[in-house]
Image: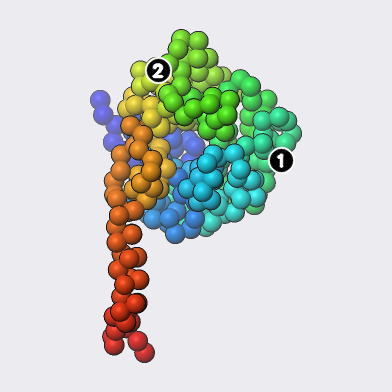
Amino acid sequence: MSVAKKDYKRITTKSLIEMKSNGEKISMLTAYDFTMAKIVDTAGVDVILVGDSASNVMAGHETTLPITLDQMIYHASSVVRAVERALVVVDLPFGSYQSDPKEALRSAIRIMKESGGHAVKLEGGKEIKESIKKILNAGIPVMGHLGLTPQSIYKFGTYSVRAKEDEEAEKLIADAKLLEKVGCFAVVLEKIPAHLAEQVAKSISIPVIGIGAGGGVDGQVLVIHDMLGMNNEFSPRFLRRYLNLYEEMTKAIGQYAADVKSSDFPNSGEQY
């Protein structure tokens, strides 16, 4: 029996769990600034991730590692000011939670107090359990992240698909169940086999959001710059480009430059 889609005026962690139980897919996109977040929120996306991918798409770094806690707070603050409906989840950046649960709590508190974000996201499973518990005990919602974890790129040595072998797949399943048990409200699974992701989604009660994890999960997330085609150098199999803004923007900006050079802009109707 199908369940009527609920009209959520404001998305909360409880809303996402309801969506999973009702069979309603969850939409999630990144945003890093006020203007883009306003558009994403108005369009009806359920969750906005202020991702450490800002290190790549906003600052031009090769990896997510260089971005700092202060920079994440700046981006998150800009996003929160724009949002009326979506749940805003903020990545804890590399180095702000892995080594010390107390440091993890301090980092999460700073994000919540200084940005106004609604939840934080951490990469990893059993190895960061104590950090997650410390944050949750302070009343801060936590989203997990398993599979390809970009903050561990130098450990993996590649951005290729994770958990193809039985040992890693079994650990991923165990970690997902652990994240559910300690109290995470959702888990992101990145770049793992679709059948494994579907198995995880069916084995836990909290929502599983996929990126490169197939359609058998509870929702999907993409980086906004990728799905809008602003980045023309990144073409993984899991990416669907909904626009080609790189081409459109380059054309428009080139036309503007030409119009200025030719004195076509501004014309008589564009001056005071």
The residue tagged 2 is 196
- Report if residue 176 is visible in the image: yes
**Can the viewer see residue 88 in this picture?**
no
**Residue occupying the point 50% across, 45% down:** 56
Toward the viewer: 266 or 220?
A: 266
Which of discs 2 and 1 lies nearer the camera? The answer is: 2
Among all residues in the image, which is located at the extreme left?
1
Distance CA(mark 2)–CA(mark 1): 34 Å
Q: Quadrant of the N terminus?
A: top left
* Residue 115 image point, x, y percent: 60, 51
Q: Residues within 10 Å of mark 1 (few under 14, many from 20)?
A: some
Q: Position of residue 104 (x, y in %)?
A: 68, 35
Q: Mark 1 sits on what residue?
A: 106
Helix, strand or loop under label 2: helix
Q: Is residue 192 left or right of residue 2?
A: right
Q: Is residue 256 left or right of residue 16?
A: left
Task: Residue 245: name its quadrant.
Answer: bottom left
- Quadrant housing the C terminus: bottom left
Q: Kindly identify the residue that appears in the image at 45 percent across and 45 percent down.
A: 30
Q: Is residue 42 left or right of residue 34?
A: left
Decide: is 38 above or below 187.
below
Residue 121 is drawn in which quadrant? Answer: top right
Q: Mark 1 and mark 2 in contact (Cβ < 8 Å)? A: no
